[in-house]
């Protein structure tokens, strides 16, 4: 369990910018905005976004990219669940939880899944453009958005800073790694589907 070595860092990060009642400083509307932001990293939302993105890629005849995106997001969820089961770290209790959160704390599932999903989206749709500036902007925007979602988990008091750092780095790393490791399996799956469709038309 990643406790002990990061205890002081985690406490300082979690208690930073908080009032005497241990709630984050700032107006009420900011709390609502942060809750809306953190919802963008929720399991259901990410899976719905993934379905829409995969359908859009297939409609654009980018089936390899669509298959790669689906495989990346699915495998990322499995990897994150494996890490959570392995470490089993409890969530912080030194500040109020300003949103509902269950399960183990390390690594942050919102951070891991947001980074892996949004960066995978960016990589998939970046393939549609031949302009390097467009591709770099898409990937950079996905990284900034997923970092903001990761930060929201600490702000809401449901994760230690080390949870979200590990989650975001793991998710981002998985998105780039999967784009290389799963490229051939995705291409093979598309070819197999094409051959099966062709055989059915012949028969």
Image (cartoon, grey):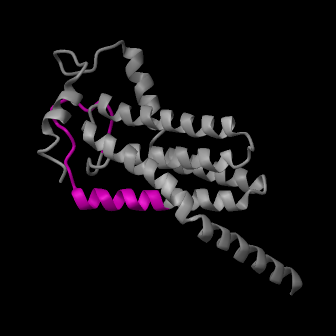
Q: Is 37 located above or below residue 88 in the figure?
A: above
Quick one: which residue is furthest to the bottom in this view? Answer: 203
Quick one: which residue is furthest to the front in this view? Answer: 132
List x then y, in percent, for residue 133: 67, 35
Residue occupying image coordinates x 19% and y 39% = 92
List x then y, in percent, for residue 175: 50, 52
Residue occupying image coordinates x 54% and y 45% = 119
Residue occupying image coordinates x 24% and y 38% = 160
Instruction: Compare residues 105 and 9 and report the one nearer the observer.
Output: 9
**Which quadrant of the figure has residue 183?**
bottom right
Residue 93 is covered by the magenta coloring: yes
Q: Residue 159: in sight, yes or no?
A: no
Q: Is residue 199 left or right of residue 26?
A: right
What quarter of the picture does the C terminus occupy? bottom right
Instruction: Compare residues 135 and 122 and report the one nearer the observer.
Output: 135
Q: Is residue 33 left or right of residue 89?
A: right
Q: Residue 203: in sight, yes or no?
A: yes
List x then y, in percent, for residue 104: 26, 51
Q: Is 98 located above or below residue 58 in the figure?
A: above
Q: Is 14 located above or below residue 136 in the figure?
A: above
Quick one: which residue is furthest to the right in this view? Answer: 202
Q: Is residue 194 left or right of residue 188?
A: right
Residue occupying image coordinates x 28% and y 20% = 24
Q: Which residues are magenta?
A: 75-101
Quick one: which residue is furthest to the top in this view? Answer: 27
Residue 87 is covered by the magenta coloring: yes
What quarter of the picture does the N terminus occupy? bottom left
Q: Is 55 located above or below residue 28 in the figure?
A: below
């Amino acid at each position: 369990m990643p406790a002990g070595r990061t205890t002081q860092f985690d406490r300082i990060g979690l208690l930073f910018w908080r009032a005497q009642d241990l709630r984050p400083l700032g107006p009420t509307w900011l709390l609502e905005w942060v809750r809306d932001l953190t919802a963008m990293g929720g399991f259901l939302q990410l899976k719905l976004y993934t379905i829409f993105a995969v359908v859009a890629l297939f409609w654009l005849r980018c089936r390899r990219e669509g298959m790669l995106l689906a495989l990346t997001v699915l495998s990322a969820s499995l990897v994150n669940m494996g890490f959570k089961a392995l470490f089993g770290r409890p969530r912080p209790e030194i500040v109020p939880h300003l949103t509902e959160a269950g399960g183990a704390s390390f690594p942050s599932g919102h951070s891991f899944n947001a980074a892996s999903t949004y960066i995978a989206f960016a990589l998939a749709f970046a393939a549609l453009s031949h302009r390097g500036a467009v591709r770099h902007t898409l990937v950079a925007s996905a990284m900034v958005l997923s970092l903001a979602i990761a930060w929201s988990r600490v702000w809401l008091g449901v994760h230690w800073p080390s949870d979200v750092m590990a989650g975001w780095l793991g998710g981002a790393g998985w998105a780039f790694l999967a784009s290389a490791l799963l490229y051939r399996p995705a291409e093979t799956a598309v070819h197999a589907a094409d051959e099966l469709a062709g055989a059915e038309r012949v028969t």
